[in-house]
Image (spheres, rainbow, N blue to C red):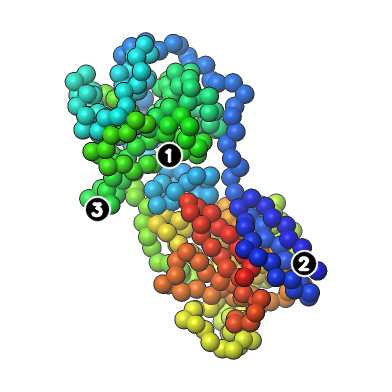
């Protein structure tokens, strides 16, 4: 009898019945943001020409791997960045609550209009710091996005007193995405009022041609010496690399998430390389160009996305495959897991450096129903599925 338990983020393509086993596919993902009960009331009503003061200090730029809506090719992992002091308009240009925000201008036009008022276009890191506020909020409205901010942006205040940051329209910044490359685009922060909540995250980056005009893109101005710090661009590394992970650390990781906690009993890694060779030898022997291992793998499917994938056994007859987002050195978050009851293993990982978006796991390579896939799905989601 086969049973399948599905949690957020895991999508089985199919489930083949295997009388001797029971299997379950589980995954962990950030829950969708929900609206706050009430909009955060501004400290004071905005007046024309007002600016917010952002002091010298550090903040956490970027986003956490696995965050809903995160695009790893655009948003680096969270990193502490120090910026000098600057001022930022409380409202989008013309920074006057009696007038509508100006949209449908190119970035050059936005820069010129800021200069005419003795100001400049904000850099994207300045924009992000002002949006996150001193508490490093995920949204300008706090931990969650309130869609009512799209209709009432002047009532949505960040911790640095800026209003409606990217709430009703995206905003040009002076920074570029992938500068100096053929793929370079101007960085726009924020989104239109009816955009999905995740696009209003303070860390969300959107690339536009600097010469484009869009009815959903405006801008706001900053004052003071510009901060030269730039957001580090996500890089593409080796597709796969074996890593060392001790059994004690594996137990800690399994216990850290309720979806895998039950696996953290009598945990064992399979023996390398004997177990990997056993998986191949059980089948017809054709490796099909793949390499095999039972060691934990570092996986880099796209620029900025780094994962740890591993197999193991819990007790005598339960095998598993687990994938984790790498948050930082020695810090992980569950991305997906696949549990095989009544399966002593071994379970090997099959991978090819030429195939980044997927790898396989198998108990018998080339045998029907004995091999599954571990898939990277954009913008940043992992699915572990059977054939």
Residue 148, visible in the rendered structure: yes
Locate residue 20, reporting x and y percent: 78, 75
Q: Which residue is mark 1?
A: 203
Q: Which residue is mark 3?
A: 181
Specify few, some or many for label 3: CA neighbours under 10 Å numbering under 14, 14-19, or 20 or more.
few
Indicate which label's residue lies in the foreground, 3 or 1. Answer: 3
Indicate which label's residue lies in the foreground, 2 or 1. Answer: 2
Residue closest to the eye, 297 or 170: 170
Locate residue 300, reporting x and y percent: 45, 62
Residue plotted at (49% across, 79% down): 290
Specify the quadrant of the image occupied by residue 30: top right
Image quadrant containing the N terminus: bottom right
Q: How far is the residue under mark 2 from the one under mark 1?
A: 42 Å
2 or 1: tag closer to the N-terminus: 2
Specify the quadrant of the image occupied by residue 168: top left
Locate residue 88, reporting x and y percent: 33, 23
Indicate which label's residue lies in the foreground, 2 or 3. Answer: 2
Specify the quadrant of the image occupied by residue 348: bottom right
Q: Which residue is mark 2?
A: 2
Position of 113 relative to 361 (above/below): above
Specify few, some or many for label 2: CA neighbours under 10 Å numbering under 14, 14-19, or 20 or more.
some
As helix, strand or loop, the secondary structure at mark 2 comes to loop
Position of 243 relative to 255 (above/below): below
Locate residue 117, reporting x and y percent: 21, 18
Residue plotted at (38% across, 35% down): 189
2 or 3: tag closer to the N-terminus: 2
Residue 93's mark?
none
Position of 345 relative to 152 (above/below): below
As helix, strand or loop, the secondary structure at mark 1 comes to loop
Image quadrant containing the C terminus: bottom right
Q: How far is the residue under mark 2 from the one under mark 3?
A: 51 Å
């Amino acid at each position: 009898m086969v049973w399948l338990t599905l949690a957020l983020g895991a999508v089985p393509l199919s489930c083949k019945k295997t009388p001797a086993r029971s299997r379950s596919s589980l995954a962990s993902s950030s829950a969708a943001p929900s609206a706050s009960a009430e909009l955060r009331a501004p400290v004071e009503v905005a007046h024309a020409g007002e600016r917010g003061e952002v002091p010298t200090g550090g903040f956490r730029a970027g986003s956490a791997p696995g965050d809903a809506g995160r695009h790893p090719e655009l948003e680096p992992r969270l990193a502490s960045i120090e910026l000098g002091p600057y001022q930022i308009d409380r409202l989008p240009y013309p920074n006057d609550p009696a007038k509508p925000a100006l949209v449908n201008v190119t970035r050059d036009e936005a820069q010129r209009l800021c200069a005419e008022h003795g100001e400049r276009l904000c850099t994207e890191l300045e924009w992000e710091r002002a949006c996150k506020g001193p508490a490093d909020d995920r949204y300008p409205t706090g931990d969650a996005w309130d869609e009512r901010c799209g209709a009432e942006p002047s009532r949505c205040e960040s911790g640095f007193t800026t209003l409606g940051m990217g709430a009703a329209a995206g905003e040009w910044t002076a920074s570029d995405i992938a500068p100096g490359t053929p793929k370079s685009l101007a960085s726009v922060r924020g989104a239109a009022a009816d955009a999905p909540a995740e696009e209003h995250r303070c860390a969300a980056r959107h690339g536009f041609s600097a010469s484009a005009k869009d009815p959903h893109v405006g801008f706001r101005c900053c004052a003071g010496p510009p901060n030269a710090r730039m957001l580090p661009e996500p890089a593409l590394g080796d597709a796969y690399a074996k890593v060392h992970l001790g059994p004690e650390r594996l137990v800690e990781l399994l216990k850290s998430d309720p979806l895998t906690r039950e696996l953290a009993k009598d945990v064992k890694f399979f023996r390398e390389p004997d177990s990997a060779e056993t998986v191949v030898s059980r089948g017809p022997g054709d490796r099909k160009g793949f390499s095999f291992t039972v060691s934990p793998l570092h996986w880099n499917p796209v620029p900025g996305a780094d994962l740890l994938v591993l197999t193991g056994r819990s007790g005598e007859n339960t095998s598993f495959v687990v994938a984790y987002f790498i948050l930082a050195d020695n810090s992980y978050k569950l991305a997906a897991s696949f549990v095989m009851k009544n399966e002593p293993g071994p379970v090997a990982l099959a991978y090819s450096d030429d195939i980044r978006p997927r790898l396989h796991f198998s108990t018998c390579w080339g045998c029907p129903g004995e091999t599954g896939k571990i898939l990277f799905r954009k913008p940043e989601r992992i699915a572990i599925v059977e054939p």
